[in-house]
Image (cartoon, rainbow, N blue to C red):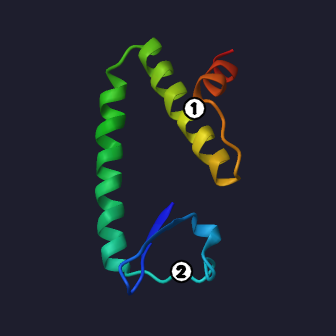
Amino acid sequence: MITIITLKNAVINMWIHEHQHWTNFIWDSEVLGSKLADVRFCQGVLLGRMQRLGFELKQEASLSILTKDVVKSSAIEGEFLSPEEVRSSKAS
């Protein structure tokens, strides 16, 4: 979800695909590149920490992330799923 602040300081929250010109992205490569580098570094730190976890904890973390991803992705489509139901269907 993106937040748009209008000239009158009104805040509008909308999904990217709801924006009128959503296919015409404009970005600052330096700013975006710096943020992506920060995210990639944090991802590496997280992966390093997960390597030290046991198999059961790794599976639990993966299931949690997958559940959140499915719930948020379905919200984009206007379908609101219960995290508990998604979790139980993925765990079985």
Determine whether 77 is above or below 69 in the image: below
**Residue 62 appears at what percent x and percent y?**
51, 28
Whole-number angstrom distance, CA of label 1 to CA of label 2: 29 Å
Q: Which residue is mark 1?
A: 67
Q: Residue furthest bottom?
A: 7
Q: Residue at coordinates 63% horizontally, 48% vertically from top-left?
A: 75
Disc on the earlier residue, 1 or 2: 2
Q: Residues within 10 Å of mark 2 (few under 14, many from 20)?
A: few
26 left or right of 29 in image: right
The residue lying at 63 percent from left, 78 percent from top is 23
Q: Are marks 1 and 2 in contact (CB under 8 Å)?
A: no
Name the amino acid, label 1: Thr
Q: Position of residue 57 (x, y in %)?
A: 42, 16
Residue closest to the eye, 82 or 73: 82
Give the residue number, with chain letter if any, for mark 2. 25
* Corner quadrant of residue 52: top left
Residue pictured at 53% horizontal, 36% vertical: 68
Q: Amino acid at mark 2?
A: Phe
In the rendered image of this protein, does residue 1 appear above or below residue 90? below
Q: Is 16 on the left-hand or right-hand side of 81? A: left
Q: Residue at x 45, y 14 (%)?
A: 55
Q: Nearer the viewer, residue 54 or 4?
A: 4
